[in-house]
Image (cartoon, rainbow, N blue to C red):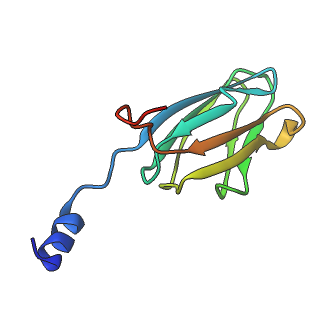
Amino acid sequence: MSAVLLALALAAAPPPSPVQVELVLQGHRFTPEEITVPPGVPVEIHLVNRDSALEEFDSEDLGVEQDVTPQGDVRFTLKPLKPGRYRFMGEMHSDTARGRVVVAAPADPSMPH
């Protein structure tokens, strides 16, 4: 396939579907504290706040600030990410509400350990 045809085929391909992740805030802590996702695909986070206080999902690494009301929930999408570790925190309770997104390719089961 020529480079032009390959470029056209890639441009016509639909964007990848977002990976769906649920993140729960309870006791001013995120569960899970670590989220692992594949590189190069968007990530939709469904943040559920079980606390009776307002919180803000905040991450300089991810370029995201998202408020979630007490006993509420919110959905937001992260852009496709490169491999690495990205920190996030709850702005209102940053001493306990901390976590990270780890972007890594899935392990190849055919590779020896």
Looking at the rendering, which quadrant does residue 31 occupy? top right
Residue depicted at 70% across the width and 30% down the height: 33
Placement of 26 over or under 64, stated as above or below: above
Location of residue 96 in the rendering, given as x and y in whole percent from the top left corner: 86, 31
Q: Nearer the viewer, residue 32 or 52?
A: 32
Question: Furthest-bottom residue in view?
Answer: 4
Looking at the rendering, which quadrant does residue 8 occupy? bottom left
Placement of 12 over or under 68, stated as above or below: below
Location of residue 6 in the rendering, given as x and y in whole percent from the top left corner: 17, 70
Residue depicted at 51% across the width and 33% down the height: 21
Q: Is residue 29 left or right of residue 101?
A: right
Question: Furthest-left residue in view?
Answer: 1
Question: Furthest-front residue in view?
Answer: 112
Location of residue 39 in the rendering, given as x and y in whole percent from the top left corner: 47, 50
Placement of 15 over or under 36, stated as above or below: below
Placement of 94 over or under 39, stated as above or below: above
Looking at the rendering, which quadrant does residue 73 occupy? top right
Quadrant including the N terminus: bottom left
Location of residue 42 in the rendering, given as x and y in whole percent from the top left corner: 45, 49
Residue depicted at 42% across the width and 50% down the height: 41
